[in-house]
Structure formats: structure tokens, C-alpha cells
Amino acid sequence: MNRLKICLLLSFVLAALLIATPVEAAQSKTDKTNIICIWTDKQKLKALTIMTFDSISGKVGILSVPLFTHLDINGHQTTIEALWNREGRAGVSRRLAELLEITIDGQITFDQPVIEQASGVIGPFEVKGHRSTLLQAFEDTRTERRKDDQDVLRAIAANIISPGGLTKVPKLLWLFTTQVDTNIHPELMLQIYRVMDHQGPTILTKKALRGRDYYQDGYRYRYVEPATWKSIMHEISA
């Protein structure tokens, strides 16, 4: 197992998790691996994405799922965030797998202190001539001050796989081998890294789950059409 490459891939997954704007977004079930990526602050859910990897085409797709996404569970109206508060990662993973008609093959969970430290280690990067960091990019997209999350994701990935990124490996390696909760097999992570290393960051596609936003009793919700739930994973991996 190449621990250096696994560390770099985990850094990329962290970047994918952070850029989670709530703006937009049934796949062929063969040759695709789906990983749920979660950012928490202790018990509080901060962001959630699903990464899909096609072992045939080599494409990597990232779906951002807004926490205020509306869910109907046996006639009970709820949201991703509320379901997390009641049933945790298992409940959210199970429901998303049903709605997206996929199998979720693994999970990666980052807690707030890990993300803060990783952001400091990775350092600033440039997007269209403007400098940013992981934390700054996340806050800007989370509060909807920026919409170019795919450009940011590719910039972070390019930073990580650049020759200069190797100097950051020791600290990142320590963070991700001791502080990250994951059940992903090293062989899968190495396979994704090789594809990204050979083909570059343009293989990455990032979208947010699209739908119709509305407010009820002072709370924001996003209603997602059944057809969108079924098609979105195909869109990000096509």
C-alpha cells in the first residue's frame, strides 16, 4: 500500500467535501463505487457529499446534498439535517441510497479540528486569479457567496497533486491516518488517485442537488423531483 498516495487522495476527498454549495444537481450500477463524505463539528452535521468513481471511464463525480433537502419518509416530512439528528450516519446513508437508487460502498467522516488543520497544511490556492483556502472556500459556498465550486475543487486537486504538494505529505499523512473515520479500502483510494494523477483535475465533475426552494414556518427546504433523484448520479458521472 502506497501511504503517500492514499494520503493525497484523502486530501482530495476533503476538498470535495468542503466545496458543498446548495444550488444545483439512477446510475448504471456496474463499475461504480459510491462514497459518502461527511463533515461534522462534534455531533453537528456541517456538510455532506457523495463521491462516485467509475472504474471504466475513470471519471469522478461529486454530488453535494444540501442539509435542508426535503425528505418524505413514510408520510413524515423531514430534512437531511433532521434525519441526521435522529438516526445519524446510518439513517442518512440508507435514505440517500434509496432515493438515488445506488449502493453506498463506504464512508469518510471528517470532524472540524481535522479540517482546520488540513486547511492550514494545504495552504492557499488560486482560483481565477484570487487566493483562497479550504475553510474560506467552504464558508463562501456554504453561505452562497460563490457558485464556482467545481473550479475551486479542480484548483485544490491540482494543488494537491503538484510536485510542491509532496512537501505537505508528512503532516497530512499523520492527520488522515490518525484522525479520519473511514472504512474505505486502500486499494480503491490508490486506484482513484492514479486516475486523477494521470488524467488531471478535469476528470472531476461537481454539482449540487437541484430542486425548488421554499420556506415554511421560517425554515428553508429544497423539494427535489423524483426524476432528479433518479438521474442526478448519472449526470455527474456521464
Image (cartoon, rainbow, N blue to C red):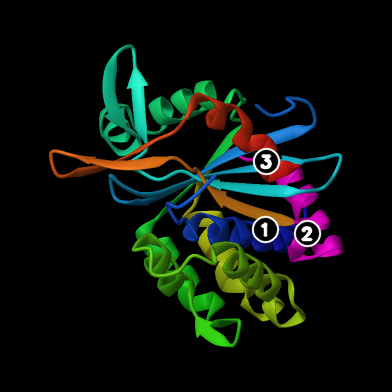
Give residue 9's mark: 1
Cα gap from disc 2 to disc 3, whole angstroms: 19 Å
Residue 211 position, x and y percent, is: 44, 40
Q: Earlier in the sequence, mark 2 or mark 3?
A: 2
Cα gap from disc 1 to disc 3, whole angstroms: 23 Å
Residue 182 position, x and y percent, is: 54, 43
Q: Amino acid at mark 3?
A: Glu
Query: Is 19 rendered above or below residue 233?
Result: below
**Quarter occupied by the C terminus:** top right
Q: Amino acid at mark 1?
A: Leu
The total of numbered circles placed on residues is 3
Residue 173 position, x and y percent, is: 60, 64
**Which segment did they paint magenta?**
183-203
Quick one: label 3, few (<14), some, or many (20+) residues within 10 Å? some
Query: Is 67 rendered above or below residue 88?
Result: below
Q: Residue beneath label 3, please?
A: 235
**At 71% across and 83% down in the image, what residue appears?**
164
Q: Residue furthest left?
A: 217
Q: Nearer the viewer, mark 1 or mark 3?
A: 3
Query: Is 174 rendered above or below residue 214?
Result: below
Foreground residue among 155 and 211 = 211
Quick one: label 2, few (<14), some, or many (20+) residues within 10 Å? many
Q: Residue beneath label 2, please?
A: 196
**Residue 185 on the magenta segment:** yes
Q: Amino acid at mark 2?
A: Met
Residue 65 position, x and y percent, is: 46, 43
**At 73% across and 71% down in the image, what residue appears?**
161
